[in-house]
Amino acid sequence: MTDTIFALSSGAPPAALAVIRISGPAAFDAVAAIAGGLPDARRASLRRLRDPASGETIDRALVLIFPGPATATGEDLAELHLHGGRAVVRRMEAVLGAMQGLRGAEPGEFTRRALEAGRIDLTEAEGLADLLAAETEGQRRTAMRAAEGHLRQTIGLWNDRLLMLSAAIEAAIDHSDEADAADDDAILAEVRAGASGLANVIADVLAQPPVERLRDGIRVVLAGPPNSGKSTLFNAMVGRDAAIVSPIAGTTRDRIEAPVVRNGIAWTITDTAGLAEATDDPIEAIGIARARDSIGAADILLWLGDDTPPTPDGVDVIAVHPRADLAERASVPAGRLAVSTHDTDSVATLWSRMEHIAATLLPSGDVPALNVRQRDLCGSARAGLCSAAQLADPLIIAEELRAAGQAFDAITGQSHVENVLDALFGRFCIGK
C-alpha cells in the first residue's frame, strides 16, 4: 500500500498561517482522529485539533479534505491550516508522524505523486520546478507556460502527426502483397514528406534560445585597455561600488561579477582587467588572460577602448565611448555610444541597447522554451524523422518513426525516466 505522506507546504514559521498537507490512503483517517470527524469535502471547517494519544488540544484551525482522484496528487488529500507558530507546527508534525502508516514527505514527493497519477506530465513538473526557482518576471512567465502544459500540448500535436505517419507506413507494410508498386511509392512519398515537414517544425523550436538562458542570465562583459572607465561604468550598472575605481592603471586585476535584474531580465555583469599589450607582472598577465576568456564567453561585449573592438564569434558588441562628459572626449566617433556615469540618461540608453539585443537571446513566449534534456530528446526525434525522410525501406522508416515516438514519450515522462525524476524532484522543497 502507498504510504500516506505529510509536510508543511507553506512558508517556514513563524508566520500568520501554516498549511500542512496530508496525502494518501490514510489521510482522512488521520484527520478524523485529530479533528474528531471529517468536514464536508472541499469546504473549510473550523475544528479543535487534538493529539489522539493524550486528548490535548494542539490548535483551533481550519480543516479541508479533498477526495481523490480529483486532487493535485490523485489521492485523498487533506490540509490543516494552523496558526503559524513553530511550536504548533512541530507538535502537529510529531502527532502525524506517530500515526500508523504516515511519514514525512520527501522533497518533491507531492508533485511526484501528481506525475505518477497522471495529473501532470514531466514537462509540467519541470515547469513547476522552474516556477518555484523563478527570480525574474521572464523566468516566471516561461515557467508558468510550461507548468500549464504549453510544451506538453506541443509534443502532443507532434505525436499525433507522427502516429498518422506510423499508421500509414505500418499499413503499407501489412498490405505490401496486395498493393501495386505505384500505391507503395505514393505512400512512401507521403510518409517521407510528412517526416521531413515535422522535422522542420522541430528544427524551428530547437533554433530558439534555451530556457537555461533565462535562469543563468545574459552575460555582459566590460572590456578595454587599462584606465578606460570599465570599473566606473560597472559600478553604475550594478548600482553599488562593487569594483575599486582608481586612476592607477591595472587596479582591476581579476574578473568581478555581479548579478543584476532589470525589467524582468537577469544579467551577469563582468568587469575585467585592462587589456595591456604587454606586461611583466605575472598577476596582471593572468588577469588579462581571464579577461580574454570572458570576452569569448560573453553574450554582449561592451568595448570601452578607442580602438577597433574585437569581434568574437557569437558575441554582440557595443562600442562604448566612455567618460563622454570630459571636455577632451566631447567628440563622439561614428558608431560609438556615448556614455557618462554622471549622465543617467546615457546609462539608460546603454541598457536599452542591451535589452534590444537580449530580446534576440532569450526565449520568446510564442514557442516552447526547452531545457537541455528536452532539447536533446527533440534533437533525437528530429534525427529519426530526417532519417525516415531519406530512406526507401518501409521497415527501416517504421523503425525510425518509432524511435522518434520514444523520444517524445521520454520528454513527457511516459517512458522510463527514473533517474530524471530523482534529479528533478530533488530540486523541490519538502512540502511540494
Image (cartoon, rainbow, N blue to C red):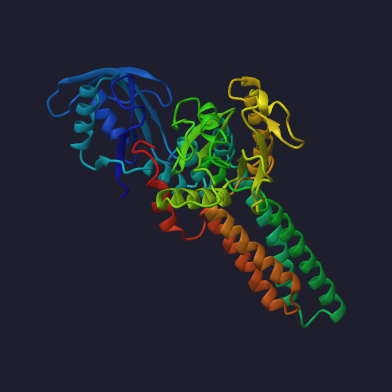
- Where residue 38 appears, as percent x and y from the top left, is 32, 26
Left or right position of 299 against 270: right
Taking 391 as reference, is 121 left or right?
A: left
Q: Is residue 235 left or right of residue 336?
A: left
Residue 350 against residue 360 in the figure, above or below: above
Find the residue positioned furthest to the left. 54
Taking the spot 32% from the left edge, 48% from the top edge, the residue there is 2
Q: Quadrant of the C terminus?
A: top left
- The residue at 80%/65% (across/down) is 193
In the rendered image, the vertical position of residue 246 relative to residue 406, given as above or below: above
Of 94 and 203, which appears nearest the observer? 203
Q: Nearer the viewer, residue 109 or 330?
A: 330
The image shows residue 187 at horizontal and vertical percentages of 81, 71
Question: Nearest the camera: 81 or 278?
Answer: 278
Q: Residue at (58%, 24%) from the top-left corner?
A: 341
Q: Position of residue 420 (x, y in %)?
A: 44, 55
Nearest the viewer among 316 and 361 is 316
Q: Position of residue 224 (x, y in %)?
A: 58, 42
